[in-house]
Amino acid sequence: MTSSSGVRWSAAPLSRDWASPIDGSICAVMWPTLTLVGRERWFDELYVWTEGFQASTMQRARIQLAALSKGFALLERERVARVGVTLSFGTVERCLDQVTELFDANRLFAHRSCILLRGQIDRVRSRYRVRGFIDWLRTQQIPVGYRLTATRIGMEMKAIDFVAPDFAKVLAPSSSRAEYWADVALEARAAGLKLDRAIVAGIELPDQRKNAQTAGFAFGQGHAVRPPYDPPTTPGAARHDPSVDTVFSLD
């Protein structure tokens, strides 16, 4: 979750029963991802979340498909140089055709996207579908990352081994002790993650940025790195899959 308010849309279009619409919101914000040394920009992440309700697996998939479509629209209209979008294992597993169709329809600039995968690998029923998608992305020269959510990196070794990520995103440790950050960096290396391709999210204070840099992490997200901004509008962008726009209007 971000501390930025972002932009919000009603979640009512996700309702299974139109007589009982969902009383909640779909929210989005853009997080610049920069080097901790030199301020070089890697990509801007379209970060989407829900408020007021817990999305089901298929509702989450529809939201992520809409976010992916928006990410391609941002590239098409030159609103960002590179964009990052998160897809869960469940979305890839259940909506593989829709996901690959979006990439195929936007092949001219899909190579400027970065995909972050997330989820619980033990719940994936068709690993070959997810594995095939990862391999396909790499043949398209699209970086594949993994977004860690567990409190300890070692708790996600199965997913890390499965994805073999080109880059990873971790949350900034709550501790301000430099030694603790060094331990996190050591655990990341032991898990096979490359710190020069690791993003520390949630860097809100100058001390956090300093600790991340000292520990050897290369990239950061957060107010102490660069404030977030609202997703730009994309008027006139091609609509390759209009069905995703019924979820919410990202324009």
Image (tube, rainbow, N blue to C red):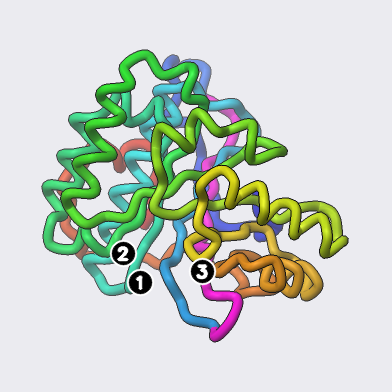
In three-dimensional space, the C-alpha distance between marks 2 and 3, rounded to whole angstroms, equals 14 Å
Residues drawn in magenta? 22-38
- Vertical comparison of 100 with 1: above or below: above
Q: Residue at x 69, y 66 (%)?
A: 215
Dot 1, how many residues are within 10 Å of its Cα: few (below 14), some (14-19), or many (20+)? Answer: some
Identify the secondary structure beneath mark 1.
loop
Residue, disc 1: 80
Return the residue nearer the eye: 135 or 115: 135
Asked if the residues shown at circle 1 and circle 3 are in contact, with their CB atoms under 8 angstroms apart, the answer is no
Where is residue 2 drawn, in percent x and y? 66, 54
The amino acid type found where label 2 is placed reads Leu
The amino acid type found where label 3 is placed reads Pro
Instruction: Name the magenta segment's main secondary structure.
Output: strand
Tell me, yes or no, whether the highlighted magenta stretch contains residue 5.
no
Which quadrant of the view contains residue 251? bottom left
Q: Residue at x 42, y 40 (%)?
A: 117
Q: Residue at x 44, y 15 (%)?
A: 17
Q: Residue at x 48, y 37 (%)?
A: 160
Residue, disc 3: 32
Where is residue 40 drawn, in percent x and y? 48, 81
Identify the secondary structure beneath mark 3.
strand
Q: Earlier in the sequence, mark 1 or mark 3?
A: 3
Which quadrant of the view contains residue 102? top left
- Count of number-bearing discs: 3
In the rendered structure, the answer to whether residue 203 lies left or right of residue 90 reads right
Dot 3, how many residues are within 10 Å of its Cα: few (below 14), some (14-19), or many (20+)? Answer: many
Tell me, yes or no, whether the highlighted magenta stretch contains residue 25.
yes
In three-dimensional space, the C-alpha distance between marks 1 and 3, rounded to whole angstroms, equals 10 Å
Identify the secondary structure beneath mark 2.
helix
Residue, disc 2: 74
Asked if the residues shown at circle 1 and circle 2 are in contact, with their CB atoms under 8 angstroms apart, the answer is yes
